[in-house]
Amino acid sequence: MEDTLKLKAEKRENSGTKVSQRLRSQGKLPIVLYGHKQQTFPLAVDMHDFVEGVHHGHRLMELEVDGKNETTMIKDIQYDYLGRDIIHADMIRVNITERVTVSVALDLKGEPKGAQEGGILEEHADGLEVECRVSDIPETIEVSVDDMEIGDALYARDVKLPEGIDLASDEDTLIVICRTVEVEEPEEAEALEGEEEPSAPEVIGREKEDQEDEGEQEKGGE
Protein backbone atom coordinates (compact mmCIF):
# COMPACT_ATOMS: atom_id res chain seq x y z
CA MET A 1 0.00 0.00 0.00
CA GLU A 2 1.21 3.50 -0.74
CA ASP A 3 1.85 5.96 2.07
CA THR A 4 -0.83 8.49 2.95
CA LEU A 5 0.28 12.09 2.57
CA LYS A 6 -0.92 14.38 5.37
CA LEU A 7 -1.91 17.95 4.51
CA LYS A 8 -3.61 20.78 6.32
CA ALA A 9 -6.56 22.24 4.46
CA GLU A 10 -8.43 25.47 5.03
CA LYS A 11 -11.99 26.20 3.99
CA ARG A 12 -12.56 28.91 1.42
CA GLU A 13 -15.79 30.84 1.48
CA ASN A 14 -15.75 32.04 -2.10
CA SER A 15 -15.03 30.35 -5.40
CA GLY A 16 -14.45 31.46 -8.96
CA THR A 17 -11.59 32.14 -11.34
CA LYS A 18 -10.32 35.31 -9.63
CA VAL A 19 -10.41 33.71 -6.18
CA SER A 20 -8.51 30.66 -7.48
CA GLN A 21 -5.91 32.87 -9.15
CA ARG A 22 -5.40 34.80 -5.92
CA LEU A 23 -4.96 31.58 -3.93
CA ARG A 24 -2.39 30.25 -6.38
CA SER A 25 -0.47 33.54 -6.21
CA GLN A 26 -0.30 32.94 -2.44
CA GLY A 27 1.15 29.46 -2.92
CA LYS A 28 -2.13 27.66 -2.27
CA LEU A 29 -3.99 25.15 -4.42
CA PRO A 30 -7.80 25.29 -4.64
CA ILE A 31 -9.39 21.86 -4.21
CA VAL A 32 -12.88 20.45 -3.73
CA LEU A 33 -13.68 17.67 -1.24
CA TYR A 34 -16.80 15.55 -1.69
CA GLY A 35 -18.14 12.01 -1.43
CA HIS A 36 -19.77 9.56 1.01
CA LYS A 37 -22.99 11.58 0.80
CA GLN A 38 -21.44 14.28 2.97
CA GLN A 39 -21.16 18.01 2.45
CA THR A 40 -18.99 19.27 -0.39
CA PHE A 41 -16.26 21.64 0.74
CA PRO A 42 -14.17 24.05 -1.33
CA LEU A 43 -10.73 23.97 0.31
CA ALA A 44 -7.18 25.17 -0.18
CA VAL A 45 -3.94 23.30 0.56
CA ASP A 46 -0.26 24.14 0.30
CA MET A 47 0.61 24.11 -3.40
CA HIS A 48 4.21 22.92 -2.97
CA ASP A 49 3.35 20.03 -0.64
CA PHE A 50 0.49 18.83 -2.85
CA VAL A 51 2.52 18.98 -6.08
CA GLU A 52 5.49 17.22 -4.46
CA GLY A 53 3.14 14.50 -3.22
CA VAL A 54 1.71 13.97 -6.72
CA HIS A 55 5.19 13.82 -8.25
CA HIS A 56 6.11 11.11 -5.74
CA GLY A 57 3.08 9.04 -6.69
CA HIS A 58 0.77 9.83 -3.76
CA ARG A 59 -2.94 9.43 -4.41
CA LEU A 60 -4.12 8.97 -0.85
CA MET A 61 -4.08 12.12 1.26
CA GLU A 62 -5.22 12.72 4.81
CA LEU A 63 -6.64 16.22 4.98
CA GLU A 64 -6.94 18.02 8.29
CA VAL A 65 -9.98 20.30 8.10
CA ASP A 66 -10.92 22.28 11.23
CA GLY A 67 -9.11 19.75 13.40
CA LYS A 68 -10.89 16.77 11.79
CA ASN A 69 -9.00 14.29 9.63
CA GLU A 70 -10.50 13.17 6.32
CA THR A 71 -9.05 10.20 4.42
CA THR A 72 -9.24 11.19 0.76
CA MET A 73 -8.08 10.11 -2.68
CA ILE A 74 -7.29 12.22 -5.72
CA LYS A 75 -10.18 11.93 -8.14
CA ASP A 76 -9.17 14.46 -10.75
CA ILE A 77 -6.37 16.94 -11.37
CA GLN A 78 -6.60 19.97 -13.66
CA TYR A 79 -3.51 21.43 -15.33
CA ASP A 80 -2.91 24.76 -17.04
CA TYR A 81 -3.25 25.12 -20.80
CA LEU A 82 0.36 24.01 -21.26
CA GLY A 83 -0.34 20.80 -19.35
CA ARG A 84 2.50 21.60 -16.96
CA ASP A 85 1.27 23.21 -13.72
CA ILE A 86 -1.51 21.89 -11.47
CA ILE A 87 -4.22 24.51 -10.98
CA HIS A 88 -7.03 22.55 -9.29
CA ALA A 89 -7.85 19.13 -7.82
CA ASP A 90 -10.93 17.14 -6.86
CA MET A 91 -10.63 14.96 -3.76
CA ILE A 92 -13.09 12.23 -2.79
CA ARG A 93 -13.62 10.83 0.69
CA VAL A 94 -12.75 7.15 1.03
CA ASN A 95 -12.89 4.47 3.66
CA ILE A 96 -9.62 2.60 4.03
CA THR A 97 -11.43 -0.76 3.60
CA GLU A 98 -13.67 0.09 0.62
CA ARG A 99 -12.91 -1.04 -2.92
CA VAL A 100 -12.13 1.60 -5.51
CA THR A 101 -11.09 1.73 -9.16
CA VAL A 102 -7.79 3.50 -9.74
CA SER A 103 -5.13 3.83 -12.41
CA VAL A 104 -1.76 2.34 -11.45
CA ALA A 105 1.48 2.93 -13.35
CA LEU A 106 3.26 -0.02 -14.98
CA ASP A 107 6.94 -0.69 -14.31
CA LEU A 108 8.59 -2.74 -17.08
CA LYS A 109 11.36 -4.99 -15.74
CA GLY A 110 14.15 -6.81 -17.56
CA GLU A 111 15.43 -6.95 -21.13
CA PRO A 112 13.57 -8.87 -23.84
CA LYS A 113 15.26 -11.80 -25.60
CA GLY A 114 14.39 -10.15 -28.87
CA ALA A 115 16.77 -7.29 -28.07
CA GLN A 116 19.69 -9.64 -28.83
CA GLU A 117 18.36 -9.96 -32.38
CA GLY A 118 17.93 -6.23 -32.86
CA GLY A 119 14.39 -5.95 -31.54
CA ILE A 120 13.06 -3.04 -29.52
CA LEU A 121 10.22 -2.60 -27.04
CA GLU A 122 7.34 -0.40 -28.11
CA GLU A 123 5.15 0.71 -25.18
CA HIS A 124 1.45 1.27 -25.82
CA ALA A 125 0.18 1.77 -22.25
CA ASP A 126 1.89 3.16 -19.17
CA GLY A 127 -0.80 2.20 -16.66
CA LEU A 128 -3.78 -0.04 -15.94
CA GLU A 129 -7.14 0.51 -14.30
CA VAL A 130 -7.53 -1.87 -11.36
CA GLU A 131 -10.09 -2.45 -8.63
CA CYS A 132 -8.95 -3.04 -5.07
CA ARG A 133 -9.33 -1.93 -1.48
CA VAL A 134 -8.01 1.50 -0.69
CA SER A 135 -5.56 -0.09 1.73
CA ASP A 136 -4.17 -2.31 -1.08
CA ILE A 137 -3.52 0.29 -3.79
CA PRO A 138 -0.02 -0.48 -5.15
CA GLU A 139 2.42 2.26 -6.09
CA THR A 140 3.25 0.46 -9.36
CA ILE A 141 2.61 -2.87 -11.05
CA GLU A 142 5.72 -4.71 -12.22
CA VAL A 143 5.67 -6.35 -15.65
CA SER A 144 8.50 -8.70 -16.69
CA VAL A 145 9.54 -8.50 -20.35
CA ASP A 146 12.52 -10.90 -20.12
CA ASP A 147 10.90 -13.69 -22.18
CA MET A 148 9.64 -11.49 -25.01
CA GLU A 149 10.96 -12.30 -28.46
CA ILE A 150 10.50 -10.37 -31.70
CA GLY A 151 6.82 -10.41 -32.58
CA ASP A 152 5.65 -11.08 -29.01
CA ALA A 153 3.07 -8.78 -27.41
CA LEU A 154 1.76 -8.38 -23.86
CA TYR A 155 -1.84 -7.47 -23.18
CA ALA A 156 -3.61 -6.40 -20.00
CA ARG A 157 -4.84 -9.96 -19.52
CA ASP A 158 -1.21 -11.16 -19.41
CA VAL A 159 -0.21 -8.92 -16.49
CA LYS A 160 0.07 -10.77 -13.19
CA LEU A 161 -1.68 -8.67 -10.55
CA PRO A 162 -1.02 -8.84 -6.80
CA GLU A 163 -3.49 -10.79 -4.70
CA GLY A 164 -6.71 -8.92 -3.98
CA ILE A 165 -6.38 -6.69 -7.05
CA ASP A 166 -8.67 -7.16 -10.06
CA LEU A 167 -8.23 -5.85 -13.59
CA ALA A 168 -10.65 -3.07 -14.51
CA SER A 169 -9.12 -2.14 -17.89
CA ASP A 170 -10.17 -3.94 -21.07
CA GLU A 171 -8.29 -7.24 -21.05
CA ASP A 172 -7.36 -6.73 -24.73
CA THR A 173 -5.52 -3.47 -23.99
CA LEU A 174 -2.08 -3.69 -25.63
CA ILE A 175 0.71 -3.00 -23.13
CA VAL A 176 3.95 -3.56 -25.01
CA ILE A 177 5.23 -5.26 -28.16
CA CYS A 178 8.72 -6.37 -29.20
CA ARG A 179 9.35 -5.56 -32.85
CA THR A 180 12.17 -5.17 -35.32
CA VAL A 181 13.62 -1.81 -36.22
CA GLU A 182 12.53 -0.82 -39.70
CA VAL A 183 15.41 0.58 -41.75
CA GLU A 184 14.27 2.77 -44.62
CA GLU A 185 16.36 2.89 -47.78
CA PRO A 186 17.42 6.37 -48.91
CA GLU A 187 15.10 7.72 -51.57
CA GLU A 188 17.98 8.50 -53.93
CA ALA A 189 19.23 4.91 -53.76
CA GLU A 190 15.76 3.58 -54.51
CA ALA A 191 15.48 5.93 -57.48
CA LEU A 192 18.82 4.77 -58.88
CA GLU A 193 17.86 1.12 -58.53
CA GLY A 194 14.79 1.71 -60.66
CA GLU A 195 16.75 3.34 -63.51
CA GLU A 196 18.14 1.39 -66.47
CA GLU A 197 21.67 1.92 -67.73
CA PRO A 198 21.70 4.73 -70.30
CA SER A 199 22.13 3.55 -73.89
CA ALA A 200 24.89 4.88 -76.12
CA PRO A 201 23.91 8.09 -77.90
CA GLU A 202 22.81 7.65 -81.49
CA VAL A 203 24.95 9.50 -84.01
CA ILE A 204 22.58 11.15 -86.45
CA GLY A 205 23.67 11.03 -90.09
CA ARG A 206 26.43 8.43 -89.63
CA GLU A 207 24.61 5.76 -91.64
CA LYS A 208 24.06 8.16 -94.55
CA GLU A 209 27.73 9.20 -94.56
CA ASP A 210 28.84 5.54 -94.58
CA GLN A 211 26.61 4.84 -97.59
CA GLU A 212 28.02 7.82 -99.51
CA ASP A 213 31.61 6.68 -98.76
CA GLU A 214 30.85 3.21 -100.09
CA GLY A 215 29.35 4.70 -103.29
CA GLU A 216 32.45 6.78 -103.96
CA GLN A 217 34.75 3.75 -103.47
CA GLU A 218 32.71 1.77 -106.00
CA LYS A 219 33.03 4.58 -108.58
CA GLY A 220 36.75 4.74 -108.02
CA GLY A 221 37.06 1.02 -108.56
CA GLU A 222 35.43 1.29 -111.93
Image: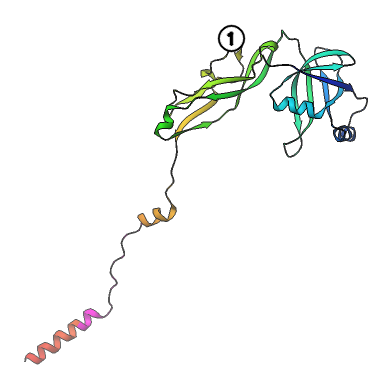
Which residue is at the front of the view, 28 or 161? 28
Q: Is 165 positioned to the left or the right of 115 in the image?
A: right
- Residue at horizontal 92 percent and vertical 27 percent from the top: 14
Residue corresponding to mark 1: 163
Q: Is residue 219 above or below residue 36?
A: below
Q: Is 118 positioned to the left or the right of 82 in the image?
A: left
Q: Residue furthest right?
A: 13
**Dividing the picture into quarters, in which one does residue 56 lie?**
top right
Which residue is at the front of the view, 161 or 205? 161
Q: Is 184 positioned to the left or the right of 96 in the image?
A: left
Q: Is residue 195 magenta?
A: yes
Colour approach in the figure = rainbow
**Dividing the picture into quarters, in which one does residue 103 lie?**
top right
Residue 130 percent coordinates (x, y): 63, 17
Which residue is at the front of the view, 176 or 141? 141
Residue 17 percent coordinates (x, y): 87, 34
Q: Is residue 167 magenta?
A: no
Residue 220 percent coordinates (x, y): 9, 92
Q: Which residues are magenta?
A: 194-209
